[in-house]
Image (cartoon, rainbow, N blue to C red):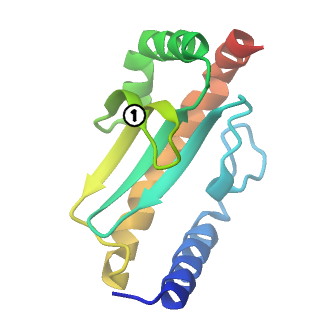
Amino acid sequence: MLSKEAQKEWNIRFWNGFKNEMKSFPSSNGRRINWLTYPTDVKNVYLRMVCGKDFVAVNFDIQFNDQGIRDIVWEQMEELKGLINTQMNYPSEWSRGIQTKEGLVIDQISWKLDNVNYLNEANWVIIYDFLKNRIIAFDKFHQEFKDILINLVD
């Protein structure tokens, strides 16, 4: 078990390594992008990368407080499900009504790789490859269809 300070240093090293890995990859629209804070351009919709002691995931979180708006966005994503699954080329997990640690209720589409540990530096190549492939594929999908989501919530 790492101390709080050691955990913080490890996280910084891990994410800086990933940032360095991704610096030569522009968005599919040709612009430079900070992949660690992917800009969805849609309020209350986030792309998050999560690493744990036995998994890594890329999560598309729909976090509207208004259940009705969350339902509309979710229904639109379900209509695009075939397209996103084809683009991602990786199994997805679709979950509604997840309660976060902060008490928010969110809907989430997730791409997860099990049996890897970001605290094991030997796993970093596998984790970086997984994250890179998922977020680049997501970016291609999102750049093509984000206007649909933007128009839904504006």
Q: Which of 48 and 63 lies nearest the eye of the viewer?
A: 63
Label total for image: 1
Give the percent coordinates (x, y) of residue 34: 71, 56
As drawn, the residue found furthest toward the front would be 103
Q: Residue at x 75, y 43 (%)?
A: 30
Say what amino acid the circle numbered 1 marks: Ile
Q: Residue at x 66, y 13 (%)?
A: 148
SS state under label 1: strand
Q: Residue at x 39, y 73 (%)?
A: 125
Q: Which of 58 and 62 lies nearest the eye of the viewer?
A: 62
Residue 48 located left or right of residue 146: left
Q: Quadrant of the N terminus?
A: bottom left
Q: Quadrant of the C terminus?
A: top right
Q: Residue at x 63, y 23 (%)?
A: 144
Give the percent coordinates (x, y) of residue 13: 56, 82
Give the percent coordinates (x, y) of residue 7: 48, 83
Q: Which of 110 and 146 lies nearest the eye of the viewer?
A: 110
Residue 142 located left or right of residue 124: right
* Whether residue 113 is situated above or below residue 136 in the rendered picture: below
Residue 23 located left or right of residue 139: right
**Pointer 1 local density, CA inside 10 Å: few below 14, some 14–19, many at least 20:** some
* Whether residue 97 is situated above or below residue 56 in the rendered picture: above
Residue that label 1 marks: 98
